């Protein structure tokens, strides 16, 4: 018996539980007197938005090369750092972590569109038991790869989809939770981010940096504020029955997304 326990302990050390195995189970309940978290996400200073160079690789057929240049252009704004006049930050994710129970997530698919060699939306939310709808609105080849971002800068591919035809659409179920990076293997400047969730308590800040998350069961929660160009901020927030908790968060430290290095920026 002791020998068996030793073997099990060693196996546990060699093969630690994955984040999926350790995930918090979520129970759908009827939330009758939930609370609200609302607020604004700001930056401590204005950061210049990068201009992304577009380098189209020559194709065997010169007409295809010209079509790609016409579709993609020679450069595009990253739209990474988008601020309101009072430094509200657009496209920050607000994630209530480790929620054990609450209302059901919406049954809503997420459309990820390859349009003018840019992903739309740049930041999105997807829900388990719904689907990703991957579309190519361009008359050129795109390859859309979705990968879960792991610790240490690693990435685990979830879907890798070739879309050679204009208006082609592929539908895939949302099965993996967490932060997902979207990229196009054919065009290294293209990127987007999706947070895939089992619960509905996730938001994206609007043009003014504002957000609102409703109908949370009363309790104390850890809330993560994520943005591709800033270091994360985590806050402990208490939600009271029928009440509203106002929050203001300020990003102070920037970070450089990995895709910029591939562009020489």
Image (cartoon, helix red, strand yellow):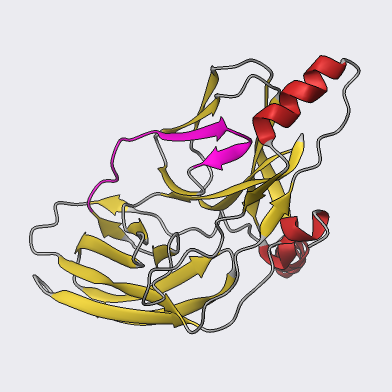
Quarter of the view holding residue 32? bottom left
Vertical relation: 76 (above or below) 246: above
Vertical relation: 222 (above or below) 192: below
Residue 193 horizontal/vertical position (percent): 55, 51
Q: Residue at x 45, y 59 (%)?
A: 91
Quarter of the view holding residue 204? bottom left
Question: Is residue 118 one of those drawn in magenta?
Answer: yes
Q: Residue at x 48, y 84 (%)?
A: 44
Using the rendered image of the protein, determine whether residue 154 is visible from the camera's viewpoint.
no
Q: Residue at x 81, y 16 (%)?
A: 63
Q: Residue at x 19, y 68 (%)?
A: 36
Using the image as rendered, state which of residue 160 and residue 75 is in the foreground: 75
Q: Quadrant of the C terminus?
A: bottom right
Using the image as rendered, state which of residue 126 and residue 57 is in the foreground: 57
Query: Magenta stretch?
Result: 103-120
Q: Quadrant of the N terminus?
A: bottom right
Residue 41 horizontal/vertical position (percent): 38, 74
Vertical relation: 24 (above or below) 125: below
Tell which residue pokes out farthest to the right in this image. 60
Question: Is residue 188 one of those drawn in magenta?
Answer: no
Residue 77 horizontal/vertical position (percent): 61, 53
Using the rendered image of the protein, determine whether residue 171 is visible from the camera's viewpoint.
yes
Tell me how many marks there are: 0
Q: Is residue 227 left or right of residue 5?
A: left
């Amino acid at each position: 018996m002791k020998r068996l326990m030793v073997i099990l302990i060693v196996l546990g050390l060699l093969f630690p539980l994955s984040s999926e195995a350790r995930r918090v189970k979520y129970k759908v309940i009827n939330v009758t007197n939930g609370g609200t978290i609302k607020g604004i996400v700001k930056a401590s200073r204005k950061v210049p938005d990068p201009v992304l160079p577009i380098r189209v690789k020559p194709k065997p057929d010169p007409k295809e090369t010209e079509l790609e240049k016409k579709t993609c252009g020679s450069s595009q704004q990253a739209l990474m750092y988008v601020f309101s006049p009072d430094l509200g930050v657009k496209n920050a994710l607000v994630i209530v972590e480790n929620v054990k129970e609450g209302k059901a997530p919406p049954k809503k698919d997420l459309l990820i569109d390859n349009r003018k060699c840019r992903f739309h939306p740049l930041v999105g939310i997807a829900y388990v038991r719904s689907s990703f709808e991957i579309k190519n609105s361009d008359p050129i080849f795109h390859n859309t790869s979705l990968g879960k971002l792991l610790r240490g800068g690693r990435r685990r591919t979830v879907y890798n989809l070739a879309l050679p035809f204009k208006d082609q659409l592929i539908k895939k179920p949302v099965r993996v939770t967490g932060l997902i990076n979207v990229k196009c293997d054919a065009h290294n400047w293209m990127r987007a981010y999706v947070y895939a969730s089992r619960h509905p308590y996730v938001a994206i800040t609007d043009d003014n940096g504002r957000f609102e998350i409703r109908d949370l069961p009363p309790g104390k929660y850890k809330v993560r504020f994520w943005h591709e160009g800033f270091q994360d901020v985590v806050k402990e927030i208490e939600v009271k029955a029928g009440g509203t908790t106002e929050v203001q968060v300020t990003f102070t430290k920037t970070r450089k997304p990995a895709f910029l290095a591939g562009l020489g920026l």
